[in-house]
Structure formats: C-alpha cells, structure tokens
Image: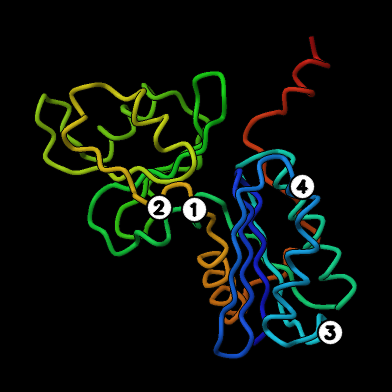
Amino acid sequence: MNSLALDSSQEVLSLALSAGKDVFYTEIDAGQRHSELMMESIDLLFKNAEIRPEELNLVSCMKGPGSFTGLRIAYSTAKGLAMALKIPLVAIPTLDCLAHHLSFRTEIVIPAIDAKQGRFFAALFRGGKRLTDCMDASPEALVRELVKAGLSAGPAPDEKIILTGSGAALLHSRLPEELSNVILLDPQFRRGRARELLEIANNTIMKGETNDLDSGPVYIRKSDAELNRQK
C-alpha cells in the first residue's frame, strides 16, 4: 500500500511515505514555515519513491492537540489530497503518535507539547496504552494524574517517567525536584513522528476503521485569537 503521513503539529515538519515495502522520510526544523515547505517536501518524497500521486492509497495527519496553525495546514493538505485522489484520510491523536515509539517501555510515558501560559498538552501512557484523556494541564495537575496512575507520592517514587514530545524539556524543568531522580528525557523528544503516524494509520485502515475525511482538528483549548475576541 502507498501511504502518506503528514505531521506539522509541532515545530518540526515530518513527512513519511510508504511505497510498497519501502518507507521514505523527511524531517525539517520548519518553525513557522510549514505551509511554505509542505508541498515541495511531499513532491520530493514522491520523486524519491519513484511513484506518482495518483498511485497513493491513503493519506494521514495528526488529529490534535498541537499547534493550531500546524494542525490546520496538515489537515487541509491531507483533505485536499484525499478528495482529489478519492482515497481515505485517517487522523490519529497527536499524543498517541508521540508516545508510540515508547510503547515497549514499562515506565509511565508522558508526551508533552508546550501549550503556553504554563500549561502542556499531555497524556499518560503505560505499555502503549493511554491512561488518561488528552489534557491541557499544569505541571501540578500532571503530578496528580501520576499519583492516580500509581506513582508513589513520597520522596522516592518507585516507577520511572519518560518525557517525550517537543515540550518535554520544558515540562522536565517545571516538575517537582523530588521527581528529578525518576524522570528520563527521551533523547529524541524533538523529533517529528510521521513514521509512527504512518504505521498507526496503516494499521487503522487495515482494521476497517472509518474514513476521517469529514472530520477536523481536535482543539482542547480555544486559540488566543478566539479568546481575545471574547474579551
């Protein structure tokens, strides 16, 4: 199956294309240039894979949470391709993709994205299973969720915590000092996760899951522009 995955949910633009048994990948530290770089990066992937867009069978993107603008860019691109080529679109929760490469670990995994204002888009995972909903949470609220998940509240917690996602380093600096000995920072926390998105989306469509062509990004917080309009 030829499948394209688009991840512009964070600062890094990450794209992956499976063409038969081969996977082609590109990653760019795009900053605010996702829309500028998206289509030319997709074109380059097709050229490297030596396939035409018309040969694509599936396109996928991150569902959210994440950057308001970044999510919209990937969603609009994915929808445009899906509609033009009459192929399915699969949207996967961003935090599930960020945690996926750590599914084999037994520690609590927290994928985190800086949501500004001292808060983080985050969730708790263990063994590849999500323990909480996707949250817009303060570090203090995340500590409470850790306790609920079974982490010792005492001075010597008995379970390790792995932080990943673009907000991992900042969250690490905001968590209580007594957790410092049990927190591990994923060395690849800033990487884009289009390859993981590609794998999850391919598995999802093979199970006969429904097409997400009529869906849109999931925002668990209103944008700053929306909040300003309500003042």
Residue visible at 52% across and 72% down? 199
Res 191 label: 1
Residue visible at 79% across and 23% down? 225
Q: Is label 2 or label 3 in front?
A: 2
Mark 3 sits on what residue? Answer: 54
Instruction: Point out the residue furthest to the bottom here.
Output: 20
Q: Residues within 10 Å of mark 2 (few under 14, many from 20)?
A: few
Of the residues under marks 3 and 1, which one precedes in the sequence?
A: 3
Of the residues under marks 2 and 3, which one precedes in the sequence?
A: 3
Instruction: Point out the residue furthest to the top here.
Output: 231
Give the left or right position of residue 4, taking residue 142 as reference: right
What is the spatial separation of the Cα atoms under label 4 and label 2, in whole angstroms? Answer: 25 Å
Q: Quadrant of residue 185?
A: top left
Element under disc 3:
helix
Q: Taking 9 as reference, is 152 above or below it?
A: above
Q: Position of residue 76 (x, y in %)?
A: 82, 55
Mark 2 sits on what residue? Answer: 188
What is the spatial separation of the Cα atoms under label 1 and label 2, in whole angstroms? Answer: 6 Å
Residue visible at 50% across and 57% down? 97
Mark 4 sits on what residue? Answer: 72
Mark 3 touches mark 4? (CB < 8 Å) = no
Q: Quadrant of residue 46?
A: bottom right
- What's the amino acid at mark 2? Gln
What is the spatial separation of the Cα atoms under label 3 and label 4, in whole angstroms? Answer: 23 Å
Q: Position of residue 110 (x, y in %)?
A: 37, 43
Element under disc 1:
loop
